[in-house]
């Protein structure tokens, strides 16, 4: 039996925010309904969803999770799922005031049968939907490169444009990465290293767990080996950066920037992501390890003043990145995960910007208060968006 939540406030002229009722937040996700148990199928993201809902309740808001196929546009209702401290139960709700996009699956997002619904959802909620969809890597590079002050921290990047152009890029950069434009979790990335004799070593992140190593004698052999992949997927070519490493394991710095209840950008967390032995990507979902930043900086740079300046430069760069991304993006952003590489001399490079930064509901090595804050801030920002949209509508009616 599906319970139906309170009568849609639209029938009485306006949203919950307008009528002083509890603000509601819809969390778009990739949940799977189990018809046998009449519950959502358990997965690794469930703890995150329940934590977001609990944070919303602490702000006197109501939050639900839902899937794209659960939206009924004509009725303006959603077959959502409500957390009751033990499991998720189905409940039919009116359209929420705000939607927080946590659909962390590019496969679902690119599903032809769901793309029309995704577009309709975006057009329906417009400025009341934040972190709408994924970025593509070329788009991010174009946005950031429009800020002249960011050019020095961007690795040379080109969009895939033919065999001869790829050859010239590798001649110019002896270490290079080929990255799927719509890739995630590091999967599909190919690291290339060209040697003086013309041979090329490749390291291909074939899956989350496996890296395939090989060597070809020339570019022609390399192109032949990966030709079919390039036909199926779009790639960018990126200059390789020799990242700082500890005990042979390279690392980058993840800075989680989020907007708070006033709409202001705040740094929530900063930590190092250490690649596992034999891997060149540091994604936590692919075997990377989260570490306190100083645990890696101290062995490399014992000078305390140098480390303090490095941290300051990291923070300043993260703020410049979010400002530029916000100025270019046409939809609201509530959080960004910024991956910054540090080379052996301490120079910084923006490696990637993520619209769906990975979060975990608990931590064994970090600070739980910051983990809690990383789940609280999206709900605080959701409340800000709901109230801001009300103010705009009221101004339009005055």
Image (spheres, helix red, strand yellow):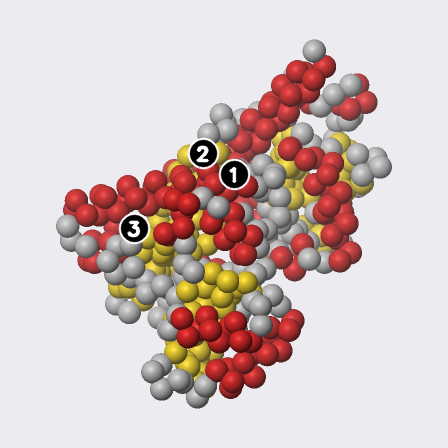
**42 to the left or right of 171:** right
> If you read the primary sequence from the N terminus, does the residue marked by circle 3 or circle 2 appear first?
2
Which x, y percent locates residue 224? 56, 84
Q: Is residue 88 visible?
A: no
Label 2 neighbourhood size at 10 Å, few (<14), some (14-19), many (20+)?
A: some
Q: Residue at x 73, y 39 (%)?
A: 123
Q: Are marks 1 and 3 in contact (CB under 8 Å)?
A: no
Please name the residue that numbered disc 2 is placed on: 265
Which of label 3 and label 2 is nearer to you? 2
Q: Which mark is residue 274?
A: none
Among numbered discs 1 and 3, the one appearing first in the sequence: 3
Residue 293, which numbered label? 3
Locate the C terminus by quadrant.
top right
- Dot 1 corresponds to which residue? 326
Q: Position of residue 9 (x, y in %)?
A: 76, 23
Q: Relative to residue 2, is residue 290 depicted above or below?
A: below
Give the distance between the C-alpha atoms of the residues marked 2 and 1, in whole angstroms. 10 Å
């Amino acid at each position: 039996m599906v319970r139906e939540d309170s009568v849609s406030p639209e029938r009485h002229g306006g949203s919950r925010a307008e009528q002083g009722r509890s603000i509601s937040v819809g969390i778009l996700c990739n949940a799977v309904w189990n018809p046998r148990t009449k519950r959502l199928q358990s997965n690794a993201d469930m703890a995150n969803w329940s934590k977001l809902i609990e944070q919303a309740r602490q702000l006197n808001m109501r939050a639900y999770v839902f899937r794209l196929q659960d939206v009924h546009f004509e009725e303006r209702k959603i077959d959502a799922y409500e957390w009751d401290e033990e499991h998720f139960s189905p409940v039919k709700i009116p359209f929420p005031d705000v939607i927080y996009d946590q659909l962390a699956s590019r496969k679902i997002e690119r599903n032809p049968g769901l793309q029309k619904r995704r577009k309709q959802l975006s057009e329906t909620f417009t400025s009341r939907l934040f972190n709408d969809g994924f970025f593509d890597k070329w788009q991010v590079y174009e946005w950031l490169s429009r800020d002249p002050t960011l050019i020095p921290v961007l690795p040379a990047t080109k969009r895939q444009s033919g065999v001869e152009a790829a050859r010239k890029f590798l001649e110019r950069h002896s270490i290079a990465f080929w990255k799927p434009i719509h890739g995630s979790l590091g999967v599909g990335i190919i690291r290339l290293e060209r040697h003086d004799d013309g041979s090329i070593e490749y390291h291909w992140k074939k899956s989350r767990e496996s890296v395939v190593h090989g060597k070809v004698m020339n570019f022609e052999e390399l192109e032949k080996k990966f030709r079919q992949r390039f036909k199926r997927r779009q790639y960018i070519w990126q200059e390789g950066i020799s990242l700082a490493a500890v005990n042979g394991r390279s690392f980058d710095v993840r800075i989680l920037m989020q907007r708070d209840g006033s709409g202001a950008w705040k740094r929530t967390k900063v930590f190092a992501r250490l690649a596992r032995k034999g891997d060149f990507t540091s994604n936590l979902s692919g075997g990377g390890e989260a570490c306190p930043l100083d645990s890696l900086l101290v062995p490399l740079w014992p000078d305390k003043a140098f480390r303090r300046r490095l941290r300051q430069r990291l923070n300043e760069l993260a703020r410049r990145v979010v400002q530029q991304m916000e100025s270019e993006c046409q939809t609201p952003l509530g959080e960004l995960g910024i991956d910054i590489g540090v080379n052996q001399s301490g120079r910084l490079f923006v490696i990637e910007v993520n619209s769906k930064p990975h979060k975990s509901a608990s931590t064994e090595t970090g600070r739980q208060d910051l983990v809690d804050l990383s789940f609280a801030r999206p709900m605080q920002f959701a409340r800000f968006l709901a109230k801001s949209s009300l103010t705009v509508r009221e101004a339009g009616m005055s």
